[in-house]
């Protein structure tokens, strides 16, 4: 009876013999011997065993513990829950893809607008009077931004277009 209770409670907790043995600081073969009825744990070990299996020593020693059985209703409810979870994951995935797609479209639009703005300015700030400290600082900042933007924007634009194409393929 003790051997069956140990085995049934261990399985109900989803533990392997090895995992239970590690928790009790014994070797797996000891747990196996207990479950086969070849040996019994001492009193201190019974207390530790009961604690690990979330039960009482009296249940370990006397009351028979039934193996958990899964009937068709349980399987049906579990499958329905899993179906709901899968639908939620699909919705989240679709929302993420749409968000990424919109962000990539926005990035493309921003790059195009900034390019148009820089083209319209025709680097007009280069003709400013740089003896004025405020214009010198503003012109230097604009020139630096334009310099970096013109070199990095094509890569960002190409990456955005590729990202948009991949998000459409993953529909």
Image (tube, rainbow, N blue to C red):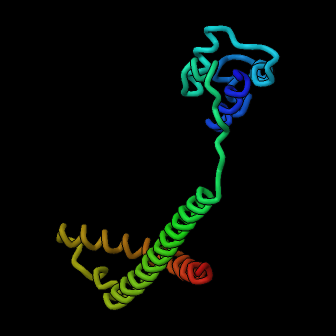
- Residue 57, image x, y percentages: 58, 18
Q: Residue furthest top?
A: 43
Q: Nearer the viewer, residue 90 or 84?
A: 84
Q: Nearer the viewer, residue 151 or 43?
A: 43
**Which residue is at 49% across, 72% downward?**
91
Height in image: 65 above or below 158?
above
Q: Nearer the viewer, residue 68 or 137?
A: 68
Q: Picture quarter containing residue 44?
A: top right
**Which residue is at 72% across, 28% downward?**
4
Relative side of 19 to 99, left or right: right
- Residue 3, image x, y percentages: 73, 23
Q: Judge whether residue 151 can be spotted in this image.
A: no
Give the quarter of the figure containing the N terminus: top right
Relative side of 87 to 121, left or right: right
Height in image: 171 above or below 3?
below
**Which residue is at 61% across, 78% downward?**
170
Q: Picture quarter containing residue 17?
A: top right
Give the quarter of the figure containing the C terminus: bottom right
Q: Judge whether residue 23 can be spotted in this image.
A: yes
């Amino acid at each position: 009876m003790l051997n069956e209770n140990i085995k049934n409670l261990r399985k109900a907790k989803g533990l392997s013999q090895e995992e239970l043995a590690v928790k009790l600081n014994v070797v797996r073969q000891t747990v196996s011997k207990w479950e086969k009825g070849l040996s019994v744990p001492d009193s201190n070990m019974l207390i530790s065993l009961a604690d690990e299996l979330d039960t009482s020593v009296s249940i370990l020693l006397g009351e028979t513990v039934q193996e958990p059985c899964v009937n068709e209703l349980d399987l049906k409810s579990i499958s329905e829950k899993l179906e709901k979870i899968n639908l939620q994951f699909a919705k989240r995935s679709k929302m993420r893809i749409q968000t990424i797609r919109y962000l990539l479209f926005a990035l493309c639009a921003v790059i195009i607008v900034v390019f148009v703005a820089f083209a319209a300015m025709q680097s007009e700030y280069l003709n400013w009077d740089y003896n004025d400290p405020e214009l010198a600082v503003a012109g230097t900042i604009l020139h630096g931004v334009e310099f970096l933007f013109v070199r990095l924007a094509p890569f960002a634009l190409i990456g955005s277009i590729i990202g948009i194409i991949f998000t459409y393929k993953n529909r």
